[in-house]
Amino acid sequence: MPVDAVCIGETMAVLVPEQAGPLEESEVFRRGVGGAESNVACALAALGVPTAWISRLGADGFGRLVVTQLAERGVDTSAVAIDPRRPTGLYVKEIARDRSSTLHYYRSDSAASVLGPDSLDLPAASALLGEARLVHLTGVTAALGYRAGHEGGRRLVEAVLDRRRPGQLVSFDLNWRPRLWDGLGTGRPAAILAELADRADVVLLGTDEAEAVFGTDDPHRLRALLPGPRVLVVKDSGHRVTAFDDDGVVTEPALAVEVVEPIGAGDAFAAGYLAGLLRGYDQRRRLRLGHVCAASALMVAGDHGTPPTTAELDVLLSCSASQWSALRASEGAFAGAVS
């Protein structure tokens, strides 16, 4: 089946302790996979959007785990390259007694750390990129390689932007990860990210990360800073999302959600919004689909929630403003004025 969307970036194996507490006291771990771009790919596939993921993995059990889990979620992994020398990246989650979590990364010399423009030239990758209507990237991919002394990730993002064909969209989620930019000096990461984002067609960023990178969380100031994208989506976590395009400005409040775990919600929002864009939805309906997908992720442990059925989505996306504000998301369900 031809793909509509291609996501590019690193995915790692993840180990999650069964019990809260310091890692040195944790005896049993569950294994899984995690990565911003593959999270988006999985969520797009769950929404019925044919999607592929391009990356590099080690020739190891964790790499095979990543491919297996993504394929089981309906993602095309035919353009994933296997590195015989470098390992699949890994991160370990540490859960505190208060249920907050800290992520410990082991990815400096991973297979994906050498992603670069040449990754786009492999026959399978070139074929997928030649047919996709949308290519999704993040600031994580742009940062890959800097800690190893090269700019492969940045050059990959630039290559995607340079090579996009007429009618093809490139989306860019800021996804600020300060540790990946270590050593570049004050202000340099912000300049690089601003340059890349301003060349994309669709840009998504959160107000918290925008404040950290660009020094402001004001949506209108951010639009002035990034005038190039056709669409700029500014997410004020848990409150509202504001979208700017040629037709004006649309703001849609977030849903009230009983949160189980916050990880993965931003990627789920991106997937919902981009699915709505590919389907030709108007701005408000795209934002609502993003909110619903984010809420679905927030209601589960782990990165991947299950979106409502097509019929349920149609009701949620079509409700009035007052019905929308009355909705509550809890234990995998949406209840309120339209239930």
Image (cartoon, rainbow, N blue to C red):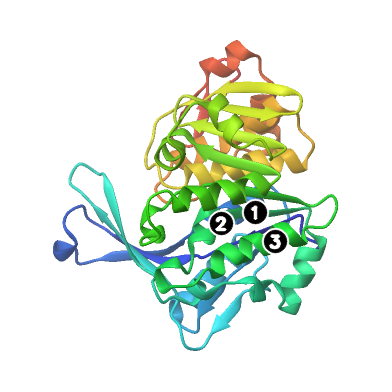
Residue carrying label 2? 37
Position in image of residue 285 (x %, y %) = 69, 28
Q: Earlier in the sequence, mark 1 or mark 3?
A: 1
Q: Earlier in the sequence, mark 2 or mark 3?
A: 2
For residue 136, the mark is 1
Position in image of residue 333 (x %, y %) = 51, 32
Residue that extends furthest to the bottom in the rendered view of this protein? 84
Position in image of residue 207 (x %, y %) = 46, 33
Work out whether 255 lies above or below 184. Answer: above
Tell me how far mark 2 sits from mark 1, CA to CA.
Answer: 7 Å
Is residue 335 or residue 275 the one in the foreground? 275
Amino acid type, callout 2: Glu
Tell me how far mark 1 sits from mark 3, CA to CA.
Answer: 10 Å
Residue carrying label 3? 160
Work out whether 40 lies above or below 98. Answer: below
Amino acid type, callout 3: Val
